[in-house]
Image: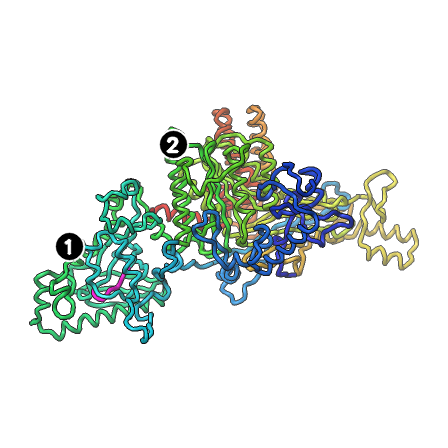
Amino acid sequence: MVGEGDDDDEEKCPICVESLSFSYRLPGEKPHVVPECGHALHEECFVTVYGEVPTYGSKRNIGLCGVCRQKMRIVDGGGERKRSKGKKLDMLMGATSTPPLRAIPSYPSLSSYQSPSSPSDPYGDDPVDLAQITSSSRSFVGESQPKVVVPTISIRAEFASTTRRQNKPTTAMVTIEVPHAGDRGRYPATRMIDSLRSPSMMNSPRLPGSPGSFASHDITHSPKSGPSAAPFSHVEAELKHRVLDYKNSGLDTLGPLRLYDMIAVRKGSMLREFLMYLYNDALICISEEKPNAFQKIFSSSSSMRSTDTKSSTGTGSGRGPLKLRGRIYVKHVKKLVDSSVPSEFSITILMENEGMESFILTFKDKGSHETWRSTLQQIVDEAKQPATSAKGGNSANKIARLMGSGAPPPAPGGSSRGGKAATTPGLPSSSSMGFGPTFSDFGSPSTVDQHSPDRRPSAGDLVNNAPLAPIHTPLDLVIVLSIPASPPGASAPLKLRLMRQSLAFVFALLGSKDRVSIVSCEMGTSIRKTPLLNPTKYESRRRLEEFVEAIGAGSTPGDESEVQTQPDERCDVVTAINVSLDVILQRKAKNPLTGLILISDTNEVAKRAQMDLVCARLDAANVPVHSLGYGKAHDPTPLWMVSNHTQGTYTFVREWYHLRDALAGVIGGLMTIALTNMKLHLSAQENEFRIVKVTGTPQAIGSASGKTLDIELKELRFGERREILVEVELIGNGSSRNSGESGDGSRPGPRRSPSLINGMDSMSVGDANSALREMVYEESMVDEVPVIEVDCSFHDPAIGRSVSRLAHPVLLTLAILPTLSSPGNQYSDPTVQRRKMELIASDMLTRSLLLVSRRNFSQANKLLGETRKIVRTISEGIQGNIPAGGKARTKKEVASVQAVAQLDNIVGDMDALCEALDENPELFGKDQRNFASQQGIVLRSQRSWTTKTGTEAWYCTDDVRRIIQISGEWGVKG
């Protein structure tokens, strides 16, 4: 059954995380308590946490709100609550006359979806376009109507049959598998009209991008208005202010501007994007320069640039100056060739001089390609017409020959600007420079870094690049960085640089609908944060990059990103998590998916009381925390606590240079989430069986009778496989038809199908015949009974639909053999055995870490050694099912081969831990302890974001591997 509603959108109490809906009100329950901040909670929950509800107007300090951390003040009981409901109704109706009571995720203002927040507001999130989320997030399916992703659920027993007298419980394994995503497609590059718009440019049009590169003939003017200004006067004015040494550039002598766009230019094997301006006489290539630290310091000096350029280069607003990279004169163009292929739209420019190389312009879409091709061809044809009519006697041609091939063409009439030919001493011509310095600058490392050793493209260069990630469900991502406060050692700058590079990759990875917020905590110094910003927008990308550059610089006066903490709060990792929860809980609008990543490089121990408060707020946010322990010096205790409490993961980044790949794996896992709110419902159909134990899941609630069991899995990803072990047992081994106690005090006897019992009663069979039939039934007949029925409910965030139950639940049936029959040689299912060993190994790793924390190294080593021996014995037993030569043919043989491979990975992890305990027990607590904790979580949760070890690679999905591969390629390209 599929529904349109989403249970996540209803308002919940931040204390008990239960719904505040009227339908859940109990008879006699008191009204909810609504504080001034608007985050309502149950009256009983309020009394439990804050004490008795104070009267209206009381100034007693009763604490802080658990959601927004503002002071808890109670409004008037009657009228104020009614007014708050009225204001909430106004928000739902989109009314703007009355300001909303509060900004809550459950009831966002409709105006917040339509009117973007001011870019100058340091606390405003980028708006969420909810109208396009559903239509674009599942576009990779390739269907007109997107369908709900349905997982594949199966259940198998360890043994195919059992006997009625068997006392040992029967183990069954429930497997949930999500199909692979397939080819999801790629995001297009950001349009320049959206990305290059900054606060200082809001009043004037900017450079439009593909599709529809802006042409001068696209702008029409009314004939009644008389002579109007040039259509691109605002663009030319901006070039005049931002181009370095504009007076000597000669751009004002090239005729009117016809086209402009961000275009990728290829020369040989090198490719780079430039701002291309097409004039009547030449094609100009320009790049944006990002001033280095010394230029920022001396930007006011007249020696850096002229007075005209200094005041308007845009460096104060975050935009760097523009630098001319080259020009191609139209009269030197021999031919234009349409060199497009199915995967790329391109135009090849062939030059008349054989010594000059050809250039290839690549476009993002067909519309831009056609516009540029037709306009270029028209300009080239116009330039050749006067050359064919004049036979060489024209004085203008003589002047051109005297000045050289690089001179600009003269204006009509034989002269330019008062009869004097214009020269361009400030810029080499295409013949002298051959457009070469442009490509050698970014193709040769020696010339790239001639101005700054750490020079990177500016926000204007990067924001128009297509996102690296495939199309996915829109994501709100919050990354928390906990770093030491600028230590004097030499290792801190390297770690900070690697963190900045990792964040730069995250900005390049996120899609056009994603938003990211960075929270940085320098221990004991300051906490800074950004709102949720879209890195594909120019102004947002600039703010994010400026924030990243300031990480590690300490507290600076007037920093708009700095967070004002409470007097009793310390600047530590716990406070940083609280600030990140403020970002999540105070959103006015949200994307379908939310992710929280914690990267810690500090070793300060967190207090237990602080962690309890954080865990309570994490319950209200309902967001799993994926923590990354960076380096060997960090304290993993708070990371373990928040990860285990929220069903997140913990990843130990031992090597510093592996941070980007680990972060890419976590984000790849968030981008591939296919299902949320995944819940399983297990029920024992027959009275003969009951559920006695479940392992492999952190949250499971069962009934006292053992007949029903509810399991919460939360999130499932494309290509992910989850396995849960369930133990069931026969209620009794007696032969009584009733469920009461037998005469000898043994357990209750099994009850057969009610239909069979009712049929026997209706026939009025005598007691003797009934006992005889019962004896024959148990002693000689084989019965197949239903054991467990599995159903599920989930939510598809990509299309916003929920499924309450499956059309056909999954049923496990088991053959019950007669009491006196021999079951024969039954082989245990290798997949169930493998899962059992994984859970045992995970449990033993946790126990060994507890022993290590108590400095009982010998007992920990013994425990790991015994576990390794057990796993190795089971692996050798499964190998007996594999034929000689290792060539598996049947499904059981294939499962046996896979089980042996995974068990060997576990044995390898145990070997490494035992060797570390033997060599240096003291060092084990700083290095291998974190590794053991990570492997234990991987084995238990069956989720991994890296492929460093065999165990991690076993549970790393193909989509996550693809994101890690993109990270490696991005690092190679630099």
Give the mark count: 2
Can you give x and y, in whole percent of width and height, for residue 746 in the image?
83, 39
**Residue 931 seen by the camera:** yes
Kindly state the secondary structure of the residue where label 1 is placed.
Answer: loop
In-image side of 339 versus 669 (left or right): left
Can you give x and y, in whole percent of width and height, for residue 668 in the image?
48, 49
Is 277 magenta? The answer is yes
Q: Where residue 425 is drawn, which disc sits there?
A: 1
Q: Where residue 491 is drawn, which disc sits there?
A: 2
**Residue 498 lies in quadrant:** top left
For mark 1, does the 10 Å Cα neighbourhood hold few (<14), some (14 to 19), or many (20 or more) residues?
Answer: few
* Disc on the earlier residue, 2 or 1: 1
Can you give x and y, in whole percent of width and height, for residue 150 in the image?
59, 58
Q: Where residue 409 is drawn, which disc sits there?
A: none
Quarter of the N terminus within the rendering: bottom right
Bounds of the magenta segment: 276-281
Q: Residue at x 28, y 61 (%)?
A: 361
Q: Residue at x 89, y 53 (%)?
A: 770
Q: Is residue 115 above or below residue 532?
A: below
Amino acid type shown at disc 1: Pro
